[in-house]
Image (cartoon, grey):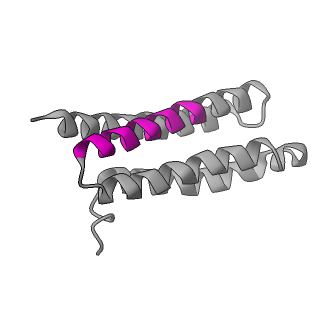
Amino acid sequence: MNELEGLMIYKQYLGMIYYTENITLKYPKSEKGAMVDEIKRITYNGMRKIILANKEFNKNKRIIILNEIDVELKMLKVMIRVSYKKKYINSQNYSAWSKKIYNIGNLLGGWIKSCLKV
């Protein structure tokens, strides 16, 4: 087991990636090249930053990366809200996806707080 597999946020985020891959299959073809690509880009970029933050030893740099992940999550929330409003996903999908983001956000907040401790 590598060090990432023991990281709860990594596990939760990986679960969200699987969910994202499955749910975006429901989107209309007209959105496959636009919104779906952007959702996936944001999602995978967030995972890339989790891996980067885990490898960063400088706490100040790590906090910057963690804040960037927070921005990615907030953008993902917007994209999911728009998806729901345009009826690309139903209320159950919206709720489940939002809950995953909320849980990751809580873990991220805890990670940021631990970095801010002296």
The picture quadrant where one finds residue 96 is top right
Please state the horizontal and vertical placement of residue 83, each as a whole percent of the image: 72, 32
Classify residue 69 as left or right of residue 27: left
At 18% across and 39% down in the image, what residue appears? 114
Q: Quadrant of the C terminus?
A: top left
Please state the horizontal and vertical placement of residue 65, each as a whole percent of the image: 39, 43
In the image, is residue 87 above or below residue 31?
Answer: above
Q: How many numbered dots are placed on residues in this image? A: 0
Q: Residue furthest top?
A: 85
Query: Of residues 57 and 20, which is closer to you in this image?
Result: 57
Please state the horizontal and vertical placement of residue 100, each as a whole percent of the image: 47, 41
Q: Quadrant of the N terminus?
A: bottom left
At 48% across and 56% down in the image, what residue appears? 48
At 25% across and 36% down in the image, what residue appears? 110
Classify residue 83 as left or right of residue 100: right
Classify residue 20 as left or right of residue 10: right
Residue 89 part of the magenta-drawn span: no
Please state the horizontal and vertical placement of residue 9, each as a whole percent of the image: 35, 50
Is the stretch drawn in magenta largely helix, strand or loop? helix
Q: Residue furthest left?
A: 118
Classify residue 75 as left or right of residue 50: right
The picture quadrant where one finds residue 62 is top left
Q: Residue furthest right?
A: 30
At 76% across and 41% down in the image, what residue appears? 35
**The residue stretch that appears in magenta:** 59-76
The picture quadrant where one finds residue 84 is top right
